[in-house]
Amino acid sequence: MRHIYIATIFIALTGICSCKKLVTVAPPTTEIESATVFSSDASASAAVSGIYSRMMSGNGFASGGSGSMTFYGALSADELVNYPPSSVSASYYFYGNNIPATAAGPTGAPWTEIYQYIYTANAAIEGLADSSSGVSSAVSRALTGECKFIRAFYYFYLTNLFGDVPLITTTDYTQNESAARTVQATVYTQIIADLVAAESLLNPDYSAVQGGERVRPIKWAAAALLARTYLYTGDWVDAETQATLVINSGQYALLNDLTTVFLKNSEETIWSLRPVLPDENTPDALTFLLTAAPSTAVNNVTLLGKLLAAFEPGDKRRSTWVDSLTVSNVTYYFAYKYRAGIAVNQPVTEYSMVLRFAEQYLIRAEARAEQNNLSGAALDLNAIRSRAGLGATTAATQADLLTAILHERQAELFTEWGHRWLDIKRTNSVDSVMTVACPLKGATWIPTAQLWPIPLTEIEADSKLTQNPGYN
């Protein structure tokens, strides 16, 4: 798999390379560079810190920007109206659920970027495990936990977007150059193993992070992603257990003032990413805030009426997390979770939220409902509804509660990390939802579109790699 190779471990960990440098090369010579990276606690910590900076350094997969999971996921689902810059743009293809698998296909960017981070995590795990490493035991444990978390995090999205994917857990190019697809169940097994390990290795609070900021994964971030993973795999007991650990950890709180949820280091933050570009807050804000009428050039997405109609009367999320702009007597609605964009000579006030506390209540509610603990499920669901200014749920049966929880996830997690897109797929409601949504987007739903195509360039470079159904 040509996307996996890199010249040196040093380049992979310090993040100084561009995507163009991640090309097929001869077997890498890594001894000197690896020894440099892992010569001390400071150098190893700096190298792993660089991973998070890279996540936010452009508009890539984790950024919240125009090439992110947040943006592509919302476009793919029933959340946005798109004003694409052209009929051959990435936003056009994701919005119309008609993504080409050609060499220049838009899924090439997230596929390649995700595997770059997986390779980087593999390199760090191997370097930290080297007995000749100069990193202390305590720092090595924490950094290994972070890198296993990162690897699990990216595989979670990779397998949910593409299905069966090559499972790469080494930097050995001889194993990577002709990797076949691994069944999703096995990928999930690896994700769970990495998260269980991370949960045991990571620090239990944010005191070890500079400034106590919530910008590095700790034990509870691993537990939170593990709870989500168990939910996706139908392990209701363990999903409930892990979500309960997070809820009872004492580290987090549901914030009644919805305007404060997405502020940096809010008590609802389990893990966030700190912006790195000068004079900017989050790419999320720059992506969704409307400052002018939407056009093909700028501000090219608004909220789909179908999403706006999903909010119940009196829902504070509708009045707080949605705003509007009227131009020439036309009103456009946009996501207003992030409110600060450009910050010239101003302090940064918002970080990009990756994992947040409210999701854990919704995970536990669903896991409890699936176990027929209806009162417990309603209790968790009502915690989210109460914060939104709504009354207790009227759902009384298991089926009604599961429907109510999915609806609550739609209202709570819109335009965040593609939650809606993944939710309708994992609950087997994607066809019914998208058959209605696609005509609203000027498109036609094809069931095979629920998996994105593997980039043709990858298939051409690896004879063992096969394409998803529905793509040429």
Image (cartoon, grey):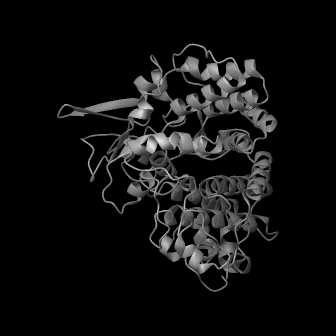
* Quadrant hosting residue 137: bottom right
Q: Is 150 in front, or is 380?
A: 380
Which residue is situated farthest in the top direction here? 391
Q: Is residue 201 left or right of residue 67?
A: right
Q: How many marks?
A: 0
* Residue 257, placed above or below residue 197: above
Question: Which of the 4 image quadrants contains residue 46?
Answer: bottom right
> Residue 76: in sight, yes or no?
yes
* Residue 470 place in picture, x, y as percent: 55, 62
What's the residue at 79%, 40% (across, down)? 235
* Left or right position of 64 against 291: right
Q: Nearer the viewer, residue 467 or 210?
A: 467
Image check: 178 left or right of 459? right
> Residue shown at 51%/76% (left/top)?
21
Q: Quadrant of residue 420?
A: top right
Q: Is residue 340 left or right of residue 247?
A: left
Percent of width and height locating residue 205: 69, 38
- Eyeballing the image, is 460 above or below 123? below
Quadrant of the frame with the N terminus: bottom right
Picture coordinates of residue 465, whole percent (x, y): 65, 73
Question: Where 181 sits versus 257, above or below?
Answer: below
Q: Does residue 252 appear anywhere in the picture?
A: no
Nearer-the-camera pick, 152 or 230: 230
Q: Residue at x 74, y 45 (%)?
A: 233
Q: Residue at x 66, y 82 (%)?
A: 28
Nearer to us in this view, 465 or 128: 465
The percent position of residue 461, horizontal first and vertical second, equals 59, 80
Residue lying furthest bottom: 26
